[in-house]
């Protein structure tokens, strides 16, 4: 048990102190947008969890490095946005082991251009992900928890999307077209006396194949700190079912490759702040609203940067009675 704990801690520290470089990435790189903090741990055995969410993201400014850039070339994009609806399913297979599946659909991935009345718009199913999470340490007295996990992802489509006879640019394709895997680690510390919880979530995503457009998305590293405060100790009818969360998330995405050559205007080094409010209805339904905004970014070359995002999610846990 002691050796297992030491190895797991080293795994966690690897994510925490991974070397970040100042590189960047475009606005609309396809993939499954993160669904917030609702589904990060291990479920109790035979509990089934359903998460439905919708995310809207908007961009309208170019940056070079960390500085704003007017970028008035004829081919420049005026603004870009996407609407993405997702589904996450999880099941507590064993007391310390959960299995998860996530998928989603882009209602639109849209780019509007500055100098011409022209729009590129993709839509459709994105990628599907399968993940296993294992709780390697839990101390109810000290309220500490450590969980690790990993999984695979696959695109719903391999052929590039064509709309009105035009093959869409890679940034508005609904699916990456890449197969990949992820590794993740989760650390939780609770303070019952002040109704607070601190969560550290670290994740690595790898795309190990080239899609049929000759494009390979770079590896991605993400470290998030969640500070959660349950308002139950105020104990009023208005606040007793409300939890407020502030998330700080650092994302580093390595450069992409096209036909085995580096795409110079790609990758990202971004720090986000994401305040969130959760409402629990009769201990059955959980409703969350998240606003997300970059507070620091660095881009190689000149790129369109994300301005803000909104996300709304609904979570439902169900006791599942099937015996294995």
Image (cartoon, rainbow, N blue to C red):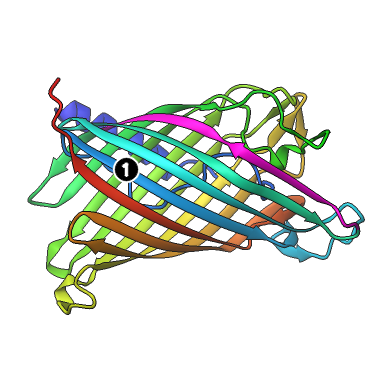
> Which quarter shows the C terminus?
top left
Q: In the shown orientation, is residue 232 left or right of residue 198?
A: left
Q: Relative to 290, does residue 12 appear above or below in the rendering?
A: above
Q: In the shown orientation, is residue 205 left or right of residue 42?
A: right
Q: Main secondary structure of the magenta part?
A: strand
Q: x, y percentage for residue 236?
A: 17, 79
Q: Nearer the viewer, residue 14 or 107?
A: 107
Q: Which residue is mark 1?
A: 50
Magenta stretch: give its range. 116-134
Q: Nearer the viewer, residue 66 or 49?
A: 49
Characterize the local packing of mark 1: few (<14), some (14-19) or many (20 or more) Cα atoms within 10 angstroms.
some
Residue 21 seen by the camera: no
Q: x, y percentage for residue 237?
A: 18, 77
Residue 69 forms part of the magenta stretch = no
Q: In the shown orientation, is residue 269 left or right of residue 161?
A: left
Residue 181 seen by the camera: yes
> Which quarter shows the N terminus?
top left
Q: x, y percentage for residue 33?
A: 51, 46
The residue that appears at 75% across and 65% down in the rendered structure is 68
Report the number of discs.
1
Q: Nearer the viewer, residue 39 or 318?
A: 318
Q: Secondary structure at mark 1?
A: strand
Residue 128 forms part of the magenta stretch = yes
Q: x, y percentage for residue 240?
A: 19, 72
The residue that appears at 54% across and 41% down in the rendered structure is 105
Quarter of the image where one finds residue 255: top right
The residue that appears at 42% across and 36% down in the rendered structure is 102
Residue furthest to the left = 141
């Amino acid at each position: 048990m002691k050796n297992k704990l030491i190895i797991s801690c080293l795994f966690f520290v690897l994510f925490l102190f991974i070397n970040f470089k100042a590189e960047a990435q475009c606005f609309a790189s396809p993939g499954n947008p993160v669904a917030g903090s609702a589904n990060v741990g291990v479920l109790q055995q035979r509990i089934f969890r359903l998460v439905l969410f919708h995310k809207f993201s908007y961009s309208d400014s170019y940056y070079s490095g960390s500085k704003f850039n007017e970028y008035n070339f004829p081919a420049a994009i005026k603004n870009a946005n996407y609407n993405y609806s997702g589904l996450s399913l999880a099941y507590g297979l064993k007391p310390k082991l959960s299995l998860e599946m996530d998928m989603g659909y882009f209602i639109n991935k849209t780019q509007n251009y500055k100098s011409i009345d022209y729009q590129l718009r993709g839509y459709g199913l994105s990628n599907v992900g399968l993940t296993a999470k294992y709780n390697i340490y839990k101390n109810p007295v000290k309220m500490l928890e450590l969980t690790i996990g990993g999984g695979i992802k696959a695109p719903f489509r391999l052929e590039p999307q064509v709309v009105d006879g035009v093959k869409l640019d890679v940034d508005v394709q609904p699916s990456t077209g890449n197969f990949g895997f992820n590794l993740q680690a989760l650390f939780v510390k609770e303070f019952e006396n002040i109704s607070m919880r601190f969560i550290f979530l670290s994740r690595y995503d790898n795309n190990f194949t080239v899609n049929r457009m000759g494009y390979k998305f770079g590896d991605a590293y993400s470290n998030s700190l969640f500070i959660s405060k349950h308002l139950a100790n105020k104990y009023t009818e208005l606040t007793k079912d409300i939890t407020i969360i502030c998330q700080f998330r650092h994302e580093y995405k390595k450069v992409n490759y096209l036909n085995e050559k580096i795409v110079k205007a790609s990758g990202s080094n971004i720090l986000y702040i994401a305040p969130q409010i959760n409402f629990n209805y009769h201990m059955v339904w959980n409703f969350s609203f998240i606003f997300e905004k970059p507070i620091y970014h660095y881009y190689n070359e000149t790129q369109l940067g994300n301005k803000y995002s909104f996300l709304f999610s609904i979570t439902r846990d169900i006791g599942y009675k099937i015996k294995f």
